[in-house]
Image (cartoon, helix red, strand yellow):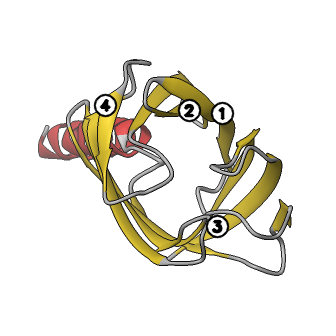
Amino acid sequence: MRTKKFALVVVVAFFASGVMCAAADTTAGTWKLNTGKSKYTPAAQARYETITIETAGDNLKVILDGTDSAGQKVHAEWTGKYDGKDYPVTGSSDIDSLAYTKVDDRHYDSTNKRAGKVMGTAKIAYSADGKTRTVTSTGTNTKGQKIRATAVYDKQ
């Protein structure tokens, strides 16, 4: 009888841990830009060398560290949800709001704005193993130039 109870406890614990792992947010963590796999056209545009994403329930905080379109160091922060609504960005001269929409557990869309005008959109994809984040973006920089980028990040 004890063996059956022990086996049941092990099965329940295994199942519960699997459910908890499946529910973990793939986006959370620190992501470093892999410059060898990334491409920016034109080269002079905002790029973030480090992105840190912290989650708490359905809320998240995104910290962007890199350079803005003028080549100046930037530390920008955004706090919001994956609900497609605009939330303010602080610390960036390029954008003042950002909206994220969750497509599924590994795919997200984002829209960034400045003074209410859409400046760019991005498709964000996470690899199946959760170790790579690819951001494919298009838009217009503050000089009015069309920009395209594929930024590849490695999880730290």
Say what secondary structure mark 1 lies in: strand
User: Which residue is rendered at x = 66% and y = 33% of the image?
Assistant: 121
**Of discs 1 and 3, which sits in the foreground?**
1
Please name the residue that numbered disc 4 is placed on: 87
Front-lying residue, 91 or 1: 91
**Of discs 2 and 3, which sits in the foreground?**
2
Mark 4 surroundings within 10 Å by alpha-carbon count, few (fewer than 14), some (14 through 19), many (20 or more): some
Q: Amino acid at mark 3?
A: Tyr
Q: Amino acid at mark 2?
A: Ser
Mark 3 surroundings within 10 Å by alpha-carbon count, few (fewer than 14), some (14 through 19), many (20 or more): many
Precedes in sequence: disc 4 or disc 1: 4
Please name the residue that numbered disc 2 is placed on: 110
Q: Amino acid at mark 4?
A: Tyr
Q: Report the disc number at residue 121.
A: 1
Q: Report the disc number at residue 153.
A: 3
Mark 2 surroundings within 10 Å by alpha-carbon count, few (fewer than 14), some (14 through 19), many (20 or more): many
Precedes in sequence: disc 1 or disc 2: 2
Q: Amino acid at mark 1?
A: Thr
Q: Report the disc number at residue 20.
A: none
Q: Are marks 2 and 3 in contact (CB under 8 Å)?
A: no
